[in-house]
Amino acid sequence: MDVSVSVSLLQDELASTIEPAVKAALHTVLCAGELKTALKPLQDKLESFNKVKEECDKTAEDIKKQAQQTERQIKEEFETLHQFLRDEEKARIAALRGEEEQKGRIMKEKIKKLTREISSLSDTIRGIEQELEAEDIFFLQKYKDTKSRYVRSGLSSSLVLY
């Protein structure tokens, strides 16, 4: 065979083999370009969704932080109120105890005074009763002393002795 025939056959064979491969490669490039063009709006949409999601995540985090801050503030306000109420309770109980103590002292003094007066009056009554039981002559001799004890006892305004 002749070299020129071989080269010609080789060229024909290569052309028949390479041409479909080139066409296929060219078709692949064209399809890829077409897909890339179609993919661009989808990528833009995905980027937009991701931005919106980030904003939503940030907003959700802000809501959570705000709720926690508000909860702390509410707890602080209630603790302040509770402390105020505890202080008010202590103050009122202390005032009550002071009033109780003061009134108790006044009552004790009244009771002491009444006890002394009861004792004195009982002694006076016993003395007068003893003198009344004494003989008439002895009674008459002690009458002035008895009457003056009676007057000093404070009963003279309600009862008169002759």
Image: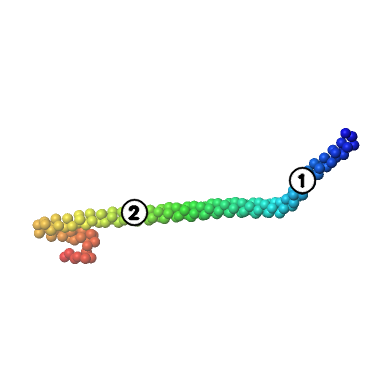
**In terms of depth relative to the viewer, which is nearer, 73 or 97?**
73
* Crowd tier of the residue under label 1, counting other residues whose Cα lies within 10 Å: few below 14, some 14–19, many 20 or above: few
Q: Position of residue 71 (x, y in %)?
A: 53, 53
Mark toward the start of the polypeptide (1 vs 2): 1
Q: Is residue 29 visible?
A: no
Q: Is residue 71 visible?
A: yes
Spatial distance from mark 1 to mark 2, Cα to Cα?
117 Å
The residue depicted at 63 percent of the width and 52 percent of the height is 53
Q: Quadrant of the C terminus?
A: bottom left
The residue depicted at 9 percent of the width and 57 percent of the height is 135
Taking 23 as reference, is 155 left or right? left
Q: Quadrant of the N terminus?
A: top right
**In terms of depth relative to the viewer, which is nearer, 54 or 67?**
54
Q: Which residue is mark 1?
A: 24
The image's colour scheme reads rainbow
The residue depicted at 87 percent of the width and 36 percent of the height is 6
Q: Which residue is mark 2?
A: 105
Q: Amino acid at mark 2?
A: Arg
Q: Position of residue 145 (x, y in %)?
A: 18, 58
Callout 1–callout 2 Cβ contact below 8 Å = no
* Crowd tier of the residue under label 2, counting other residues whose Cα lies within 10 Å: few below 14, some 14–19, many 20 or above: few
Q: Position of residue 118 (x, y in %)?
A: 23, 56
Q: Which mark is residue 12?
A: none
Taking 112 as reference, is 80 left or right? right
Taking 63 as reference, is 19 left or right? right
Query: How many marks on residues?
Result: 2
Q: Secondary structure at mark 1?
A: helix
Q: Amino acid at mark 1?
A: Ala
Q: Which mark is in front, 1 or 2? A: 1
Q: Secondary structure at mark 2?
A: helix
The residue depicted at 28 percent of the width and 54 percent of the height is 112
Q: Position of residue 42 (x, y in %)?
A: 69, 53
